[in-house]
Image (cartoon, rainbow, N blue to C red):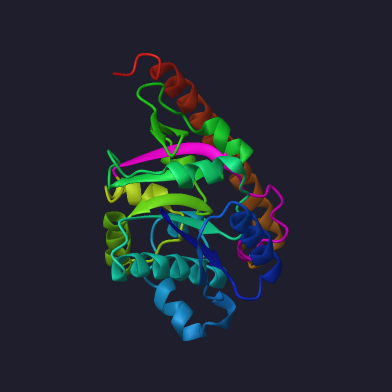
């Protein structure tokens, strides 16, 4: 049976209880991976990772938060465990993943035959906005564990989240090798695809993620870090910064909406 890992902080006992009950009811075996709590890392340790940050962290304009660093290191622990125990494929969940009978079917029917070891398979977990912008190919969808997965077309920019994915030991090893030189957040799939570490991204929609981010430590840390950048500027410059950000955001949104429209048309004639 497919190995199932759940990345979870020890202190999040309620989340652990909920997902444990669900998986036990489905008679699915799983292992908790005690996540690293970023706020307990020393400043010197955090700085070691911040100084070698790349990808989305650099583009957004503020450094990796303690929670992001802890989260990324926690997922790397899973990858290392896969290699140490010769696990070829694993399903990696975070403790707030929302599961139903479709996940039970996926695990019970899973076969690794014909899977590409350099392809990332996301089980779902995308926000409503991202789902609208992610373009899925109509050509040759694949069936994994009784669930439909579609290849994404030039949509890496909008694919986020590490709450639910299927990973090979090949990619696990590549991610670990990269981590020795660079630091990226756990779900920077765009950077990994850009560097050809990930060959393709396939996506399904049978696992959900809470839409309410109020209980997410990482989300709150990102907001605080972003706001801190704004607070460090003068009142006049702060207003100018907001205007520039708004204009930049509108131009960016228009560009990507047009791109998504073109790609959605392209999938009808894709070869």
Foreground residue among 17 and 151: 17
Which of 130/34 is in front?
34
The residue drawn where x is 41% and y is 53% is 2
Q: Is residue 221 visible?
A: yes
In this view, the residue farthest toward the top is: 269
Q: Is residue 212 magenta?
A: yes
Q: Provide residue 88's location: percent of width, then percent of height.
A: 30, 56
Based on the picture, tell me whether residue 117 belongs to the magenta stretch: no
Q: How many marks?
A: 0
**Residue 200 at what x, y percent from top left?**
33, 40
Q: For residue 11, which quarter of the picture?
A: bottom right
Q: Give above or below for 254 relative to 175.
A: above
Question: Which residue does the image show at 27% across and 38% down from the upper left?
Answer: 114
Judge by depth and name the residue closer to the eye, 238 or 79. Answer: 79
Residue appearing at x 40%, y 67% in the figure = 76
Percent x, y of residue 96 = 63, 57
Q: Nearer the viewer, residue 169 or 31?
A: 31
Is residue 242 shown above or below 252? Answer: below
Q: What is the x, y in percent for residue 57?
A: 46, 59
Q: Which residues are magenta?
A: 199-227
The quarter of the picture where the C terminus appears is: top left
Taking 85 as reference, is 214 above or below it? above
Relative placement, left or right, of 117 versus 219 is: left
| Horizontal relation, residue 170 to residue 245: left or right | left
Query: Is residue 96 something one can see in this rendering?
Result: no
């Amino acid at each position: 049976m497919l190995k199932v890992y759940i990345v979870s902080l020890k202190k999040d006992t309620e989340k652990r209880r909920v997902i444990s009950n669900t998986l036990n009811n489905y008679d699915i075996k799983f292992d908790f991976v005690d996540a690293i709590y970023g706020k307990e890392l020393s400043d010197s340790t955090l700085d070691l990772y911040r100084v070698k940050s790349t990808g989305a962290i650099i583009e957004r304009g503020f450094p990796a938060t303690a929670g992001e660093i802890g989260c990324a290191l926690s997922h790397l622990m899973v990858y290392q465990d896969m290699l140490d125990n010769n696990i070829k494929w694993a399903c990696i969940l975070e403790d707030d993943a929302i599961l139903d009978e479709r996940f039970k079917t996926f695990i019970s029917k899973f076969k690794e035959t014909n899977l590409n070891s350099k392809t990332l398979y996301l089980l779902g977990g995308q926000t409503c906005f991202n789902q609208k912008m992610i373009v899925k190919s109509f050509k040759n969808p694949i069936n994994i564990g009784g669930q439909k997965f579609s290849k994404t077309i030039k949509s890496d920019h909008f694919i986020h989240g590490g709450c639910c994915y299927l990973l090979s030991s090949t990619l696990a090893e590549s991610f670990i090798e990269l981590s020795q030189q660079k630091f990226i957040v756990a779900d920077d799939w765009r950077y990994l695809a850009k560097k050809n570490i990930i060959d393709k991204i396939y996506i399904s929609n049978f696992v959900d993620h809470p839409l309410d981010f109020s209980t997410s430590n990482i989300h709150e840390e990102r907001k605080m870090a972003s706001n801190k950048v704004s607070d460090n500027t003068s009142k006049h410059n702060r207003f100018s910064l907001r205007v520039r950000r708004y204009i930049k955001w509108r131009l960016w949104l228009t560009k990507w909406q047009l791109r998504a429209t073109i790609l959605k048309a392209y999938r009808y004639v894709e070869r």
